[in-house]
Image (cartoon, rainbow, N blue to C red):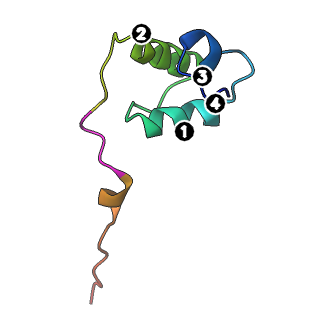
Amino acid sequence: MKKTLSPNTIIHQDSLKFELIEFCKKNQLLTYGSKIELEKRITAFLNGQIEKDKSIPSLKCKRRIIKKVI
């Protein structure tokens, strides 16, 4: 995947799904859906049509505390 932020260069048929998911994670976009859905979401984001999803917590906030059950 190329590093420029142009929709035409970043989204192409050679992109792997995990690369698209990584881009979504870095830009706080939803990461579920098919490859085509991810491509549409990223293209819309780069065109300014959708904003970042603020409900997605950062990775630092995903720590879970497991309590022992006695």
> Which image quadrant for residue 52?
top left
Q: Which mark is residue 47?
A: 2
Viewer-nearest of labels 3 and 1?
Answer: 1
Viewer-nearest of labels 4 and 1?
Answer: 1
Q: Is residue 45 above or below residue 69?
A: above
Dot 4: element:
helix
Question: For the residue marked with disc 4, what is the amino acid?
Answer: Lys
In the image, farthest residue toward the bottom: 70
- The quarter of the image holding the N terminus is top right
Instruction: From the image, give the main secondary structure of the stretch colored magenta.
Output: loop
- Between the residue at mark 4 and the residue at mark 1, the CA separation in whole angstroms equals 9 Å
Dot 3: element:
helix
Q: Which residues are magenta?
A: 54-58
Name the residue tied to disc 1.
Answer: 22
- Between the residue at mark 4 and the residue at mark 3, the CA separation in whole angstroms equals 6 Å
Query: Could you tell me which residue is drawn at 55 percent across and 14 percent down?
Result: 6
Question: For the residue marked with disc 3, what is the amino acid?
Answer: Lys
Query: Could you tell me which residue is drawn at 39 percent across and 30 percent down?
Result: 29
Query: Could you tell me which residue is drawn at 55 percent across and 17 percent down?
Result: 39
Q: Position of residue 8 (x, y in %)?
A: 60, 9
Q: Are marks 4 and 3 in contact (CB under 8 Å)?
A: yes
Viewer-nearest of labels 2 and 3?
Answer: 2
Dot 1: element:
helix
Label 3 or label 1, whichever comes before in sequence order: 1
Q: Which mark is residue 35?
A: 3
> Which image quadrant for residue 28?
top left
Label 4 or label 1, whichever comes before in sequence order: 4
Viewer-nearest of labels 2 and 1?
Answer: 2
